[in-house]
Amino acid sequence: MTEDRWSISATRTREAARSAAMIDAAYHCLDERDVLVVYDKATLQKAIDLFRSVAPSLVFTHAPKDYMMDHEMVSLLARAASFVYGAPNVSTLPRLEHSTIPHLYYCDPIEGIDPLGNEVTPTTHIDVSDQMQRKSEMLACHASQREWLRAHHGMDEYLESMRRHAARRGQQAGVAAAEAFVQHRGHAYPRNDLLAELFPL
């Protein structure tokens, strides 16, 4: 709202890297611009190449239906890249030995509803009660969005809405706070619920 696209892009890249560093995670950026993310050959190739270099066994992406089209495009790109990145000739990057179709999960859309206002029914809830402080600190790293929303709403809505949603999903799962996911179980994808196995309620 206040910076040009190049300035805010640099700011948000730094913020994302800072958030990832809090849990010793590597941060990668495909360098696509807000509201201009598309599912096309060039962008898909960048996604495939990233997957090729990482060879993930577990992938989280945006919900297929979300309030913002960028999120829907990212969901499609992640789904396509996860399915095909291990094919020998799809990328010029070396194929890592353990490349295989990973477990794929869609994160909650904002407020847990699709663009038509329908409630999303999760396949999996994860108890994050003990991680809410860290989750809040990581989210607060995205100060460019937090400060604008705080000025616009007159309160720290960016964090408060996250806490409200975590509490609502937690109530559904019988815990203080939870995150909810929908597992992609289509042809060739793993169908066992890896998250539920790793983090049983």
Image: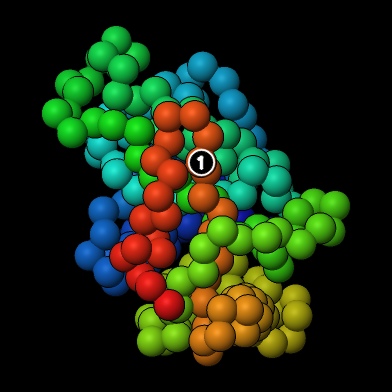
| Residue 81 image offset from top left, x and y in percent | 43, 29
- Which residue is located at x 36 percent, y 55 percent? 194
Q: Residue furthest right?
A: 116
Residue positioned 75% across, 76% down in the render: 152
Rendered-image quadrant of the N terminus: bottom right
Q: Secondary structure at mark 1?
A: loop
Quadrant in the picture for residue 170: bottom right
Foreground: 193 or 32?
193
Residue 105 horizontal/vertical position (percent): 48, 50
User: Considering only vertical position in the picture, is 199 above or below 133?
Assistant: above
Is 161 on the left or on the right of 201, as rendered? right
Is residue 120 found left or right of 19 in the rendered image?
Answer: right
> Residue tagged by mark 1?
185
Q: Nearer the viewer, residue 101 or 188?
A: 188
Which quadrant is home to the C terminus? bottom left
Residue 56 in which image quadrant: top left
Q: Is residue 46 above or below residue 109?
A: above
- Given residues 187 and 17, the one toward you in this image is 187
Q: Is residue 95 left or right of residue 145?
A: left
Q: Residue at x 67, y 60 (%)?
A: 121
Q: Type of residue at label 1?
A: Arg
Please provide percent x and percent y for residue 181. Answer: 54, 59
Which residue extends farthest left?
97
Callout 1 crowding tier (Cα within 10 Å): few <14, some 14–19, many ≥20: some
Q: Is residue 105 left or right of residue 164?
A: left
- Res 13 visible: no
Q: From what the image shows, is residue 56 above or below residue 119?
A: above
Q: Inspect this view and state whether residue 113 appears.
A: yes
